[in-house]
Each structure stands twice: as C-alpha cells, then as structure tokens.
Image (cartoon, grey):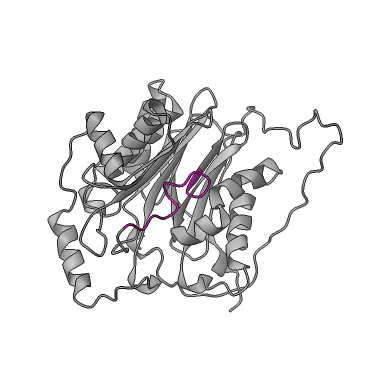
Amino acid sequence: MKRRKFIKKASLSGAGIALGHTLMSCNENAENKLVTPVTTSTTSSLPLVIATWHVENATAKAMEVLQAGGSSLDAVEQGCRVEEANEKGQSVGKGGLPDRDGKVTLDACIMDKHGNCGSVVFLKDIKHAVSVARKVMENTPHVILAGDGAKQFAISEGFEPENLLTEASKEAWEEWNLKSEYKPIINIENHDTIGMLAIDKNGDISGACTTSGLAYKMSGRVGDSPIIGSGLFVDNEIGACVATGLGEEVVKTVGSFLVVELMRQGRTPQQACEEAIGRIVNKPNSNYKDFQVGYIAVNKKGETGSYSIHQWFSMTKFQDGKNEQIQSDFFNKTKAT
C-alpha cells in the first residue's frame, strides 16, 4: 500500500479500543513534581531512530550520524533531508505534489533536547525545508517563518532556490485538475509526511517533521506538520511524538503534545498513541471513518509505540543493527461498525 493512499477511507471491522488509564496522583507538597520523569536506565539499547512510513534510507542516514557520534538533532535533520531529496516519493521536498494552483509549498519543523524549536510554513523553491527550520531555531529569535519571508531567510543562509515541481508531479496535478472540485473535500486529497524521532548515545531526544502537505490543497493551507505540539513535540525528560495524516484533526487535539503528556502521566508510548487516537474518534459527531491520523512515539527508556485510525500506517525503526518496517496496529481493527 503506497503512502499516498494513507487518508483514503479504509474498510472497517471489529470492536473497541482500550482507553483510560489511572492518572498518577500529585503530592500535595508543591516542591514535588507531578510525575517523576522517566529515567535513562534503558529497557532498549541506544541509539535509536524511528520514523513514519517506509523510509529505510532516511532512518539509515540518521543512524549513520548517530553511530559516528552525532547528536540526535543532527540525525533527524539529515534523515529527513534524504526524503526531501527523493523526487520519486512525491511527498516531501522536491517532487512533492503541488497545491491546487500547481505550486509546491513545504512545511517543516524541528525540536531539540532543550525544547528549542524552529519551523517554516508555506515555503517555496527551497528543497530542504527541515534545514531551514533548524536555521530559524538557531539563527533567529523566532520560532516560525512563513511564505516569502521564510524563502528570503533561507536564501540569506545560503540555500539555493530551485523549481520543486518535477515533471511527474506536474503531470499528476494536470490529471487531477481535469475533474477537480475547488473546495476542501477529503476524499479527493492525499497526504503524507515524514516525521522522525531519535535518541542518541547520551540518551537525548530530538525530532523533526517535513511535508509538502495535502496534495492539491487550497493555496496557503498549513497542516499540523510545522506546528510544535501538533505535528511534533519533544520533552527530553519524558519522550517525543510525531504525527501524520489529516493535519486539521491533529491540530484540533494538539496531538503530539497530548501523547507526550500521557507518557508523563505513566502511559507507555503505545498506550499514549492509542489514547490520543481515541480522543479523535470518540469526539461527538466525529467523521473519523473518512480520514486518517497516525502517531509514533518514543519514551526516555527507548520504548516505542505507533497507532492509527485506519490500517496501512507503518513505522520504520532502526535499532540494534536492524532497520525494519513495522506495521502499526489501528483503531478499526477492533472497532465495531
């Protein structure tokens, strides 16, 4: 199943999701923390890289950086750059599918072990959006730069502008344009993102997320991917999470932040991802049958989790010399219709 089919309506079957775990209680002494941070004594060996989708080349690059002594921040940036340069992927960076006007616009963010973060939205003509996001984090007093301002900043930092619309993506847009409806209808849009999380040999966590967004989106549309707390969140005391899927639904629940906070309360990464999906599908009048959201997460001990609304979502994991794709469990595997 190709990643681009991710938000298409999936076949549904089965019964319920296990939600709701007892929250850890708070000591009345104000000097004590609500929850003791997860310790660095590992149940899994480090370093570790996980990413959304089937992206073994990207996770291999990230692990190469980590094994050479690089930081988790360096690893997620370099790993995401692999997919941004992959023209055949048509999902992020050069070759990404355009908006309804035939323009490729990119969104990306990055977050380090200290909680510093940078983001770019509606970026044009610059292939490596994740690296521009890192420059925003490190070289400006801001968190987010958008549109022409983001492009001007990128050029000032030495990034070379180029045409990101490949012939294959242009042909796909022209075919869609023949029968397109110019209103936001989910079932005519496709989407995917690469989100990556890494823990280095020091036990420090960083994350990054980069995307070309919904294919044939309205011009100016921004999803969850460049929004800290929605598409990505890192808390180096606890863990990290990244999202993919229909960004509008992730934003409504501040999904990645939610997953990390659930881990802070004692959930495993898997339990936290499942509960965060539950927050979406259990909302009154949710039309979750018509869209997809997936989360991947890791905690400070190196435990991982992934979960989605519908099937066909996968996580790539590189650990202990194995770089493998793991099919994620999903809500409708056990949901009665």
- Percent position (x, y) of residue 282? 63, 68
Q: Quadrant of the C terminus?
A: bottom right
Q: Nearer the viewer, residue 189 or 46?
A: 189
Within the magenta stretch, is there residue 231? yes
Magenta part, dominant SS: loop
Answer whether residue 68 is magenta in the image.
no
Q: Residue 37: x percent and y percent?
A: 68, 32
How many labels were placed on the picture? 0
Q: Is residue 323 left or right of residue 39?
A: left
- Residue numbers of the magenta segment: 220-232
Residue 62 can be seen, yes or no: no
Residue under the point 40% across and 23% down: 70
Q: Quadrant of residue 6?
A: bottom left
The residue at the far left in this view is: 167
- Residue closer to the observer: 130 or 334: 130
Where residue 331 sits, quadrant-wise, is bottom right
275 shown above or below 302? below
Give the residue drawn at x 28%, y 34%.
153
Q: Residue furthest right?
A: 28
Quarter of the picture containing the N terminus is bottom left
> Is 219 drawn above or below residue 52 in the view shown?
below
What percent of the width, then of the height, locates residue 234? 54, 38
